[in-house]
Image (spheres, helix red, strand yellow):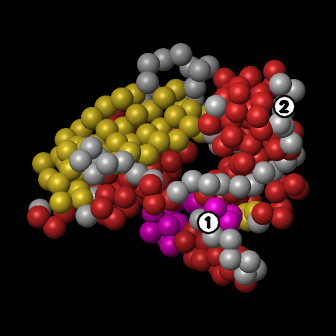
Amino acid sequence: MFLKMTGLKRLYGECREAATMIQKVILDNFGIPVTIGIGEHPFLSKFTLDNYAKKEGIAKCRYEHVPDMVWPVPIESCWGIGEATALKLRSMEIRLMGQLAKAPLHLLRKKFGIIGEQLYWHANGIDYSDLHNIGEPETKGFSHSITLLRDYLEDECKTVIIELAEEVCRRARKAGLAAKTVHLYVGYSRVEPRRAISRTHSLTYYTNLTMNVYRVCLYIFDTYYKGGPVRQIGIFLSNVAPDDAL
């Protein structure tokens, strides 16, 4: 959940009320507890979710909270910074988000290219991403994946799967499309050197309903998951058609 920079503090109270209501609706209907991060744009929302909301249930971070909430956090705990990037940053004596925020921008550009600039602005609590461009071309389908901050086991994986299913189905519904083919990817942690799960299942009908996609993914997961820590999960919908013509 994110807020555009309106400067109206009351919106944070309203968003917290909305977040509490969303939590209750999901828990009552699906039996799944969820956590929610509230911020002024997608990056702060995601950062707050990963680093604070998962401990507190609901957490919020405004721009003025960045020095206290973002800067003390280790770079490895930031969405978008993987192990390879973190290693390069540490070679530059950058270990905390605050150090990243104060690093020379031209050096980050030289070391990482456009990604270095994005990391710099994120560390300073700024996100220039264009929400209108999020998503995949309609003719190819819709996908959403996540690299987890820590190892997840079976029950936690299923919670992530339903969240990803809702996201890809939301995009499909918004585009007026439905899909007939569902692909689930599950990547194990590097401490568990087994082959990833990558399976596709084709339906006999088109759908853009979250629970339909979730049930397919759950079938794939239950069939092929043999235990062990997971670090990546992704869902891809393909073979799409206009939902008003079905």
Q: Secondary structure at mark 2?
A: loop
The stretch drawn in magenta includes residue 206:
no
Q: Quadrant of residue 199?
A: top left
Q: Report the mark closest to the observer, 2 or 1.
A: 2
Q: Is residue 24 left or right of residue 72?
A: left
| Mark 2: few/some/many CA within 10 Å (<14, 14-19, 20+) | some
Residue position marked by numbered label 1 in the rendering: 2
- Check the picture and name the quadrant holding the N terminus: bottom right
Residue position marked by numbered label 2 in the rendering: 94
The stretch drawn in magenta includes residue 28:
yes
Q: Secondary structure at mark 1?
A: loop
As measured in the structure, the alpha-carbon distance from the residue carrying label 2 to the one carrying label 1 is 28 Å
Tell me if residue 218 can be seen: no
- In the depicted view, which residue is nearer to us: 224 or 88? 88
Q: Is residue 64 left or right of residue 33?
A: right
Give the residues in magenta.
Answer: 25-41
Indicate the amino acid at tag 2: Ile
